[in-house]
Image: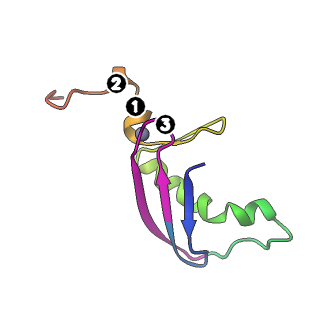
């Protein structure tokens, strides 16, 4: 999984997202301020660990990145678009 974080909620968290498609070098960094603290580690280990990533998921989708089920991680918008749907750079709508 190629989403990593620097910082912990509550507060500003920096996210690093890299495309997992073989050969693709696309990567982005963005910051989010997460106000809610994560659930207690002992009561909800999974929720605790995924707290920051869970907040970033909708934003990542908005950016056009998709999560590949099956452990392949994240693909950037270019990789997520099937070749048949891509437009040539000089093609007008
Ligand atoms: Zn890519």
Classify mark 3 as within 8 Å of ligand 1 or not, answering yes or no. yes
The residue carrying mark 2 has its beta carbon less than 8 Å from ligand 1: no
Mark 1 vs mark 3, foreground winner is: 3
> Viewed as shown, does residue 48 lie left or right of 3?
right
Classify 10 Å Cα crowding around label 1: few (below 14), some (14-19), many (20 and above). some
Q: Is mark 1 within 8 Å of ligand 1?
A: no
Helix, strand or loop status at disc 2 = helix
Residue at point 61% right, 75% down?
9
Q: CA distance from mark 1 to mark 2?
A: 6 Å
Occupied quadrant, residue 8: bottom right
The picture quadrant where one finds residue 52 is bottom right
- Give the farthest residue toward the top: 84
Q: Secondary structure at mark 1?
A: loop
Q: Which residue is tagged 3? A: 21
Quadrant of picture, ligand 1? top left
* Mark 1, residue position: 81
Give the residue at x 40% y 56%: 28
Q: Are marks 1 and 2 in contact (CB under 8 Å)?
A: yes
Q: Is residue 33 magenta?
A: yes
- Cα separation, mark 3 vs mark 2, equals 18 Å
Q: Earlier in the sequence, mark 3 or mark 2?
A: 3
Q: Secondary structure at mark 3?
A: loop
* Label 3 neighbour load within 10 Å: few <14, some 14-19, many 20+: some
Q: Which residues are magenta?
A: 15-35
Estimate the x, y position of residue 53 in percent, counting from the top left.
Answer: 60, 59
């Amino acid at each position: 999984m190629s989403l990593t974080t620097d910082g912990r909620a509550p507060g500003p968290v920096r996210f690093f997202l890299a495309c997992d498609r073989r050969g693709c070098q696309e990567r982005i960094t963005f910051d989010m301020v997460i106000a809610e603290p994560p659930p207690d580690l002992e009561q909800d280990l999974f929720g605790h660990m995924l707290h920051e990533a869970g907040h970033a998921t909708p934003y990542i989708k908005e950016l056009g990145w998709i999560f590949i089920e099956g452990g392949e991680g994240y693909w950037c918008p270019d990789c997520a678009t099937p070749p048949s749907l891509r437009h040539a750079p000089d093609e007008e709508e």
